[in-house]
Image: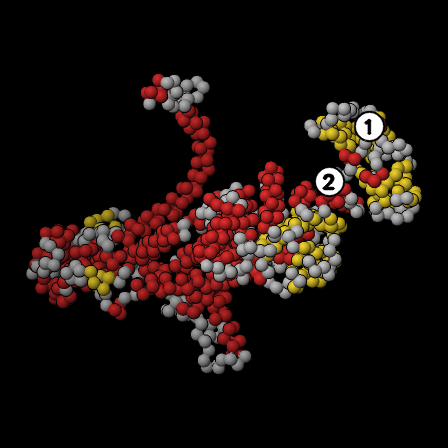
Amino acid sequence: MTDATANGKPEMLTTADGKPLKAALIRAQARARRRAFLLVLPLLAFILITFVMPIGQMLHQSVYNPGFVMHEDIGSGKRTPIMTNLKVWFDENPAGTEPDEAAFAALHEDMLLLRELRAPGQVGTRVNYERGGSRSMFTKAARRAERMDPPYKEAFLDVDEEWADPELWRVMRDASSAYTFNFYLAALDRSKNADGEIVSVDENRQIYIKLFTRTLFLSVLITFLTFLLGYPIAHLLATLPLRYSNLLMIFVLLPFWTSLLVRTTSWMVLLQSQGVVNDALVGMGILGDDNRLQMMYNQIGTVVAMTHILLPFMVLPLYSVMRPINPSYVRAARSLGATSWTAFRRIYFPQTVPGIGAGALLVFILAVGYYITPALVGGADGQLISNLIAFHMQNSLNWSLAAALAALLLAGILILYWLYDRLIGIDNLKLG
Amino acid sequence: MASSQSSDAFVEFDRVQKSYDGETLVVKDLNLTLPKGEFLTMLGPSGSGKTTCLMMLAGFETATHGDIRLNGNSINNIPPHKRGIGMVFQNYALFPHMTIEENLSFPLEVRGIGKSDREAKVMRALNMVEMGSFGKRRPAQLSGGQQQRVALARALVFEPELVLMDEPLGALDKQLREKMQFEITNLAHELGITVVYVTHDQTEALTMSDRVAVFDDGIIQQLDTPDKLYEEPQNSFVAQFIGENNTLEGTIKEIKNGLALVQLDDGELIDCNPINVSKPGERTRVSIRPERVETNPARLTEGAHTLKAEVLEFIYMGDIFRTRLRVAGNDEFIVKTRNAPDQKRMTPGEHIEIGWLPRDCRALDA
């Protein structure tokens, strides 16, 4: 370095008046950069507030549930720690300890506070998430707490024998910390037994894994069907003269401009057992009036309606990839001796792979999270995981479990995206 | 040259017509035969039907009427991949998702040729166009000229007897184009292949071909060797289309002893070589090449008709001088003179006398 300067070669380029060139460049561009940043600022703020923050909050919610440790008064917003005595007992005794009189005394103390705060329902609900039938035990015990006398163990068992259940104590111990992974376990049809070991839940209570599998299977099926239907259409669109292809494109886009609800309900009109399709089949004598096809409120309904609704998302990327493919490639292949099938397989098809990848990824991701259509036409059989997430958000109000399910879904999609990047390369993705 | 019954005909178009919409003919009654080993160029403005003819020969378009024969067999109903014709496309059409080697290997693979054979043939073809070291690259990594060579090699690798080229040099710059013209002709003659070449560039057609078919309006206007095409155009379209040309309009006064006396529209009389004019009173377009105009009175033939001209512009172009004159009311009359030591340089406004040999002055259809 010093040699270079000694030779009269400056190691850093400078402007005519001796300032470092790099600093001058940054200064010269600073104004333009500031203006550019101001232009994207609203969008950045919008995304931050409406997208990044809710997702972060959701991920937090999936591992955090304060139902057992904190009470917040709805009117005043005053926050009171609850179940503190029991927490102390849990901290002093290792997991699996038989609850002794001291434990029940602590529980009694906490119950009195709950009664005062009118919060036994909240705590019961939290425990109920992991052990069914617990909520009423808490409300009942809190009602009787004031009239209880030592020894408290007998007093509690007097209210309900179940208070001796070691699993209940395991659940309470887990819930006494606001942070827990138990909701993820629940989302994967797992739970902890009384000893704290992770075990599968009873077979008849396993629903989430089954639903994840079904969602995955149906999404793959729908993606494949949209590909099967969309590829020829996209090819036709790409090869027709512009004035015809524009008209055809309107037909492809028409579903986009119609309300999702309208499209779904029109499938209900078509598919129901007294619907257009069945009536037509019966009318033509293909079906008897008494054995009409069940095409709705099952998986068939979900698959048919979603395939139709998601079709444009496959057609558009395919079209945008196919349009610029010069027809002379196929001609060249033909002149070189390839049959039309070989020319398609070896020359045309490989060039459309980026479009297939983009379309498939788009349709698959949309299908995995689809909600309205399966809810309306899916029945019990055609429900997807998102319907269950909605159930936990709106009906069971177990937001933590809903968040855990959603987070697993998100993780699955990210893994898929990563796989796609590894296998095909994300820069090969062509959306338009 | 050869008639349609000729036995040495390798490629033969027999009364071929083509219409796309059933209302207009793009190719009208095309008759053309070419012997094995010939380099034939189809030359014409865009929309003249030359590319359509090539596509019919390749099998991508079907003839509406007539027969196309290859080696004496009608190929009208043979699909393109069974014709065994090599083709070089305008945009090269190298498969972008394959390496150069894979591109060349493709026609051999679909013919079921074994791997070792394939590799040898691919290498030989690449070396032939001096691209041997580029086999592992992809088309996008090559320059236009290199892609052109690869496209040529790919069309030749399966050893077709007939190769079609659709304006293959259109996208290259002038220098590269001239180099490739030379290489393609050499290669074609070396391998003894028959080539049908389509272009709208007349220089390319003249320098490369054994024969040139000039297309216009779906008809072959003239099919001839390059020198005949230039020096003896058979009608005014060919005269206009090939090379630079001066045109004077007039009426035939009389035709005798193989010479036509033409009265130009401003009243002056000149002697012409009658090509496709037959009787006095007919309108005619007289065509004369700029380099055949004589400006030196001393060199003019005794008794030949001369015309008065006014110099409008003099351009020094190095090897030649290009002088624009006003002759018989035509302001665009060009004279090219060689930059010789004794050559006079004219100044605008100067009045001179010009003339030419009657055989260089061709009276064509109006």
User: Which residue does the numbered mark 1 point to in the structure image?
Assistant: B296
Q: Are marks 2 and 1 in contact (CB under 8 Å)?
A: no
B194 vs A348, nearest the viewer:
B194
Residue depicted at x 68% and y 52%? B50
Residue A244 % position (x, y) = 61, 57
Chain letter for mark 1: B
Question: Which of B308/A111 is in front?
Answer: B308
Name the foreground residue: A365 vs B254. Answer: B254
Q: Is residue B193 left or right of residue A294?
A: right
Question: Which element carries disc 2, helix, strand or loop?
Answer: loop
Q: Say few, some or many: other residues with alpha carbon within 10 Å of mark 2 (under 14 / 14 to 19 / 20 or more).
A: some
**Residue at horizontal 79%, vertical 35%?**
B292
Residue A238: % across, % down: 56, 56
Give the residue at x 25% y 69%.
Answer: A203
Residue picked out by circle 2: B243
Q: In the rendered view, how is the structure colored?
A: secondary structure
Which residue is rendered at x = 35% and y = 49% of the image?
A54
**Label 1 is placed on what type of residue?**
Asn
Q: Residues within 10 Å of mark 1 (few under 14, many from 20)?
A: few
- Residue B194 x %, y %: 63, 53
Tell me the quarter of the picture where residue B78 sits: bottom right
Q: Say which chain tag 2 marks.
A: B
Give the foreground label among 2 and 1: 1
> Residue A315 in the image: x percent, y percent?
50, 57
Of the pair B165 and A413, the residue shown nearer to us: B165
